Image: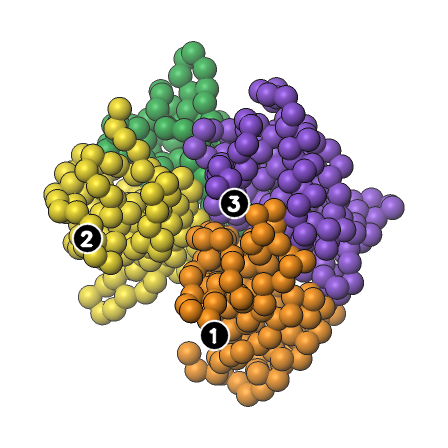
Chain colours: A green, B yellow, C orange, D purple
Amino acid sequence: MKARFDGFEAKIRESFARQDIMRTLGAELVRVEAGAVEIVAPVLDEMRQQHGFAHAAVSFALGDSAAGYAALSLMEGPDEVLTVEMKINLLAPAQGARLHAKGHVVRPGRRLVVVGAEVWAETDGGAVQVALLQGTMIPVRPG
Amino acid sequence: MKARFDGFEAKIRESFARQDIMRTLGAELVRVEAGAVEIVAPVLDEMRQQHGFAHAAVSFALGDSAAGYAALSLMEGPDEVLTVEMKINLLAPAQGARLHAKGHVVRPGRRLVVVGAEVWAETDGGAVQVALLQGTMIPVRPG
Amino acid sequence: MKARFDGFEAKIRESFARQDIMRTLGAELVRVEAGAVEIVAPVLDEMRQQHGFAHAAVSFALGDSAAGYAALSLMEGPDEVLTVEMKINLLAPAQGARLHAKGHVVRPGRRLVVVGAEVWAETDGGAVQVALLQGTMIPVRPG
Amino acid sequence: MKARFDGFEAKIRESFARQDIMRTLGAELVRVEAGAVEIVAPVLDEMRQQHGFAHAAVSFALGDSAAGYAALSLMEGPDEVLTVEMKINLLAPAQGARLHAKGHVVRPGRRLVVVGAEVWAETDGGAVQVALLQGTMIPVRPG
């Protein structure tokens, strides 16, 4: 997808920096392109569920954010996006060194943007897909 | 729904205590009945998104856990549950003093359990529903 | 929920009558109130899947329509609604004499309406819930 | 994905032929491979919603079936599959000469199979994606 306006990367990086939860998760933006954003975060002890894996909410947080910023990358000016709804299918336990979320735009729109994301658990030896997300973002004008 | 076996509350409280993420969120089990579990957590600064509200992943974490434990409350003995998939619709910004998640079982089953949850943002003056979840849990035998 | 304007029942009945698929399914509106609409249809031979039950798409059609008309019941004047997204959990085989879909509004809104629906399979002896739906409707102005 | 056993195409074609709803929709299997199945159907007058487009339930029926048969293509012997849950995002009105559903397996498993599907509306001049589906299938042994 082609960027339809300049400056989207700066806008996304600034928004990301304002999200306390991304800092709490140790998350980093590793790719910011028009229609595709990727986020990586370590698997932190304090985010584990009862079996010792990262809780599904961590995969949700990273996948939802990567998808939301992918939507934002195609929007002009002062817009932000909010998640309307998100569906996550969990494919495998989130274990390993880090989680890598890859968000993309399925269908851009003026009123709504349909998005998807994959989340992969990576170790130095390889990667396993742990989640698949599909959802809807809505542009909002900051009040 | 009637409890089909004794001891489910102790099993759920023990499992909950093993979840590091619940401690990180400051979450507490406030109701544990057969087929219905409720969790309350404060809205923490370190879990905020860019507009200053709790990130959708916090509502997801609490709603998913309340729903999962509601499913576990109907299962015998050593079983645990994992989330197969979860859909969340976000209804309003998660602002206020605390979030209150109410999980319930829609349809128990031997192979799969269909669950739902609501998440409410509470202040001393009232409560607003911020999320609605619908998903599927699967029983697992710890290895 | 209180009706916020007059004439919603006539608007819904007229829209329903224009849906060829509802006629094909033998579907009837059996309840039209502000925020709650119910539809009943027989289990037709020509809509069966390979095990002889009604195909999941029939439960989807009825539940989605009941939910969409529940949303429309709260909208003014010339508006119509379209389904943005819908999630269906299938709970039991759709067998019996007829299917009864009950749609309701979870959260009305100017830009989007969150809805839910249940579908029950009824025989003369009783009823079994066969599906649970959760989704999002968007108002559209006919062009 | 590699076929793990012989005979899956015959099994799928036989199951498809037993679905009355596929005949009612005028649907045809146009591709049957291990992990990927495609179905095409005309846009029929009797399946229209109130704006004259194919009802969302038609896209659901075709996408769900393509995804389900993609799951079945990877299963041995006498197994069949049922849909546990399915989420559909509607991207554009389903208008044109025919609908083309493309189902695939995201993650095969012994207990559950995660699947996806796209539905495209085709005319002689081109194609527009009208729906995206993500869901879960469960193997069943016919009783």
| Residue D25 % position (x, y) | 73, 53
Q: How many numbered discs?
A: 3
| Residue A100 % position (x, y) | 45, 27
- Name the mark on residue C36: 1
* Residue at image coords 40%, 60%: B92
Q: Quadrant of residue A93?
A: top left
Q: Nearer the viewer, residue D5 or C118?
A: D5
Mark pair 3, 2: CA separation? 29 Å
Mark pair 1, 2: CA separation? 32 Å
Name the residue beneath numbered marker 3: D83
- Disc 2 residue type? Ala
* Residue at image coords 46%, 35%: D112
- Image quadrant holding the N terminus of chain A, namely top right
Q: Mark 2, residues whose alpha carbon is within 10 Å: few (<14), some, or many (≥20)?
A: some
Name the residue beneath numbered marker 2: B3
Left or right: D114, with B84 as reference point: right
Q: Secondary structure at mark 2?
A: loop
Kindly indicate whether the residues beneath marks 3 and 2 are on one polypeptide chain. no
**Do we see residue A82 in this rendering?**
no
Up/down of B77 relative to B118, above or below = above
* Residue at image coords 73%, 39%: D29
**Do we see residue C128 in this rendering?**
yes
- Disc 1 residue type? Ala
| Residue B3 % position (x, y) | 19, 53
Left or right: D118, with C60 as reference point: right
